[in-house]
Image: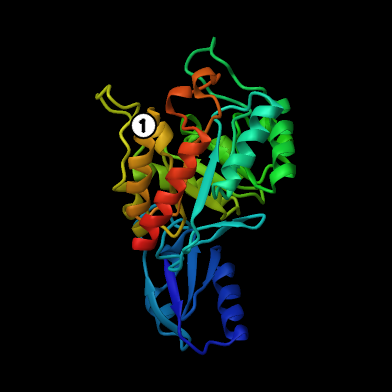
Amino acid sequence: MIAVLKGGTTAAQKENLIKWLSAQGLTVHVSEGAYKTVLGLVGDTSKIDMDLLAGLEIVDQVTRISEPFKSANRKFHPDDTVVTAKDAKIGGGNFGLIAGPCSVESEEQICTIAAAVKAAGATFLRGGAFKPRTSPYDFQGMGAEGIELLLKAKAATGLPIVTEIMSISHLDLFADVDVIQVGARNMQNFELLKQLGKCDKPILLKRGMSATLKEMLMSAEYIMAGGNEQVILCERGIRSFDPYTRNVLDLAAVPLLKELSHLPVVVDPSHATGAARLVRPMALAAAASGADGLMIEVHNDPMHALCDGAQSVTPDQFAEIAKAVATVRTAL
């Protein structure tokens, strides 16, 4: 349920209403917009008399929300959420360009790539320290050492870092990580999501390989229900029967998610297509669809990458993509 307050409502009137609603056993989320204040009511709202609430002097309208995702719902929060990490922002007109290798391999590798992508316009550095791999025999990442190398690249370039968490037992290692990524395989790891809901760090939530948009938003809800509202949604492709691409990039998800939710939406064309030659056209299409950012894998030597070299672009190719994306966004 949401209650929209009338313009001119005083702080004291708003606080009195919130106290009364909280006394009914509800959690109240306050969204202060440019022209109106929205109170999102989470809990058993059946005990609330809608007519009584709507009849209050300061209440403009009351609406029940049928969707099971409440905190992530745009009806709760009409204005776009802006997620901030250091000085970089995503959402609300702020475009994030997240770039870097699939896996951290060495200090020279990650620092070289970090400097190159920053020069090309990247606003975040991505890199995998812990890697979920289909085969137990594939490179699993450098673990804690990989995070230390990411922090060195961060110190050298100033770029906030994005890296994936595999287990909540690793959370202490992420103390200086700016954005924690939840990979597609963990999108419905609800115990992990609950713990991340207690963090004060932005969470980049990737769509599961076979997940519906509703399921993705419900996973975001797990994080937000814990108190962490800094969630970024990431469309990274869904599984299909066609072998020509690694996944099917569902770009219709971008405007749909932005219609349903106030959370920023980024697109990962690298994992979606699995082919470096397809990253540019899909990055441009993602920008045209209204995405709030892109996540692109960049490697200085893709032929010898320890992970996902086939879908990694070179720093020079990334620079060209960044320029083309800027042109598309300017045209829009």
Colour style of the rendered protein structure? rainbow
Q: Quadrant of residue 164?
A: top right
Residues 44 and 253: in front is 253
Left or right of 134 on screen, residue 66: left
Tell me what residue is drawn at x 43 percent, y 28 percent: 311
Query: Which of 160/187 is in front?
Result: 160
x and y, in percent, of residue 182 in the image: 54, 37
Q: Is 35 situated above or below 137?
A: below
Q: Amino acid at mark 1?
A: Arg
Q: Which residue is depicted at the point 62% across and 22% down? A: 141
Q: Percent x, y for residue 294?
A: 46, 46
Of helix, strand and loop, which one carries label 1? helix
**Residue under label 1:** 277
Most foreground residue, 231 or 17 = 231
Query: Is 135 on the left-hand or right-hand side of 259?
Result: right
The percent position of residue 13, horizontal first and vertical second, equals 58, 85
The residue that appears at 51% across and 20% down in the rendered structure is 133
Residue located at (47% from left, 35% from top): 188
Query: Residue 142 at what x, y percent from top left?
Result: 67, 22
Q: Looking at the image, is 218 positioned above or below residue 72? A: above
Residue 214 against residue 147 in the figure, above or below? below
Residue nearest the viewer, comparing 183 with 287: 287
Visible residue check, residue 237: no
Figure quadrant of residue 229:
bottom right
Classify 87 as above or below 205. Answer: below
Quarter of the image for the N terminus: give it. bottom left
Please state, as top left, top right, bottom left or bottom right, where the C terminus lies in the image. Answer: bottom left
